[in-house]
Amino acid sequence: MTGIDYSQKIPNNVDLASDKKLQRALERWQPDYIEWWKEAGPTDFNTKDVYLRTAISVDRDGWAQFGYVKMPDYRWGIFLTPYEGERKIGFGDHFGEDAWMQVPGEYRNWLRRLIVTQADTEPASVEQQRLLAHTAPSLYDMRNLFQVNVEEGRHLWAMVYLLHTYFGKDGREEASELLDRRSGNPDHPRILTTFNEPCEDWLAFFCFTMFTDRDGKFQLLSLAESAFDPLARTCRFMLTEEAHHMFVGQTGMARIIKRTCEVMNEHPDEDVQKYGAIPLELIQRYIYFWASSSLDLFGAEVSSNSANFFSSGLKGRAYEDKYEEHLAQDQFYVMERWKDGALVNEEVPMRNAMNEVLRDAYIKDSEKGIEYWNRECEKADVEFRFEYPHRRFHRTIGEFAGSFFDPEGVAIDEATWNTRQSEWLPTEADKAYVKSLMQKVTEPGRFAGWIAPPLRGINSQPIEFEYVRL
Ligand SMILES: [Fe+2]
Ligand SMILES: [Fe+2]
């Protein structure tokens, strides 16, 4: 069954109607979710018509339909890539056995923790972005923000379905706590640090969708390999939606860079701030901040949890198929470790290095984005080149937390860090300047002066289409 049943209160392709108890439980959670959305989401825009895509099928082609929707009426639902017959476990100690349709008792706690941690990031990002529409540089961008927001809400639904269906009372409690925590709330914060960072301007938003949503992509890729089949199929469909989020980040940044390069060429040797563009060095500092913060999300370099998750079959590697063998036993990962203030090469058992393996894949993918932005500079004949920070730079989790490294990864002392960090991370003045540019532009087809228009509109609509009816 690939079609989605929209006649139900909760759209789904999991035949929810056949499990009355589960259906009732989720229908009780639904109004709490809507209440959370109205309070913690893009509150002031809930009555506006937004041109949004909604999933209508889980087929690869033609899965989405576009139309005007008021966000609280968005049809959030439960969509899994369809069950394709028996699947075998693709890695770890259970390699080759049948995938699980139920949660094995011995892995229940680990699995719940993995699901809750992923789930928590979804509403968190909506909360972080809740005020951004007030300063949207165009209706096109405002619409993209809302699209990302409603889909993060949908991802929360995906995870809550798993919690309700497979984790009984504990799962229901976790699901309600997911609506209670708040990004940045000191007493009741979201679980992961990056998801408590303020995201108060559009430069931060584009960095977030570029780097932090991309962490989501890699977490989902590794969970899409899970031996627990419902989780694997849930994550596969989430990945379809996720691609747009990173498109928003990558192209949003490219458009800002393009605009700055234009101003640089129009007014050589002058400060671009005089003309309302964002200096490339300032953009680089935002990149360093969000890229390094997002690197933390992969966890410690050496981790017994990551070994447990891999051995048990709960969390694999991204694109596990591409590996020649799937046990990762008696193998080693050679990594630079930080011991008593010195870098030392060390062989770490591969399973304990799974966080690093996933981080490697993520970094490779992120660097492609940097190259894409540098092409904007090349096209404009501007010499500046953006850089991705070294993985040791500005880390608060793992091996390198608490020590100091420059963006090339060279160890420095604290005093050097203190004098130089304003070259590397956004300063108060940077943020104030960016903030000063953040003025809402609402005329269809018009764009704020600090960002170039996109190459094309959404769903073949013209750029001047009225993406949000204000
Ligand atoms: Fe998501
Ligand atoms: Fe996302």
Image (cartoon, rainbow, N blue to C red):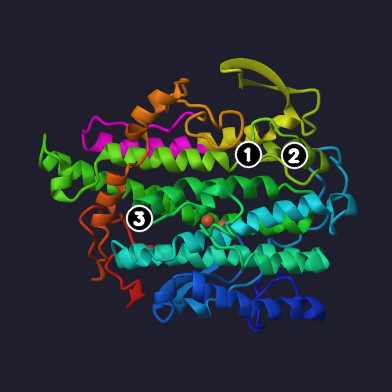
Q: Position of residue 143 (x, y in %)?
A: 39, 67
Q: Position of residue 112 (x, y in %)?
A: 76, 55
Q: Position of residue 125 (x, y in %)?
A: 51, 58
- Disc 1 versus disc 3: distance between alpha carbons? 27 Å
Three-letter code, disc 3: Trp
Task: Name the disc covering residue 305, or none.
Answer: 2
Q: Quadrant of the C terminus?
A: bottom left
Mark with earlier residue (1, 3): 3
Residue at figure coordinates x 51%, y 68% from the top left: 150
Contact between marks 1 and 2 (CB within 8 A): the answer is yes
260 or 94, nearer to the observer? 260
Q: Position of residue 175 (x, y in %)?
A: 69, 67
- What element does badge 3 sit on? helix
- What element does badge 1 sit on? loop
Category of crowding for the residue at label 1, using alpha-carbon neighbours closer than 10 angstroms: few (below 14), some (14–19), many (at least 20): some
Disc 2 residue: CB within 8 Å of ligand 1: no
Q: Is residue 319 left or right of residue 164?
A: left
Q: Is residue 116 above or below residue 207?
A: below
- Residue where numbered disc 1 is placed: 299
Task: Name the disc covering residue 202, or none.
Answer: 3
Q: Is residue 140 left or right of residue 392?
A: left
Q: Is 378 within the magenta?
A: yes
Which stretch appears magenta?
365-390
120 or 265, nearer to the observer? 120
- Disc 1 versus disc 2: distance between alpha carbons? 10 Å
236 or 120, nearer to the observer? 120
- What element does badge 2 sit on? helix
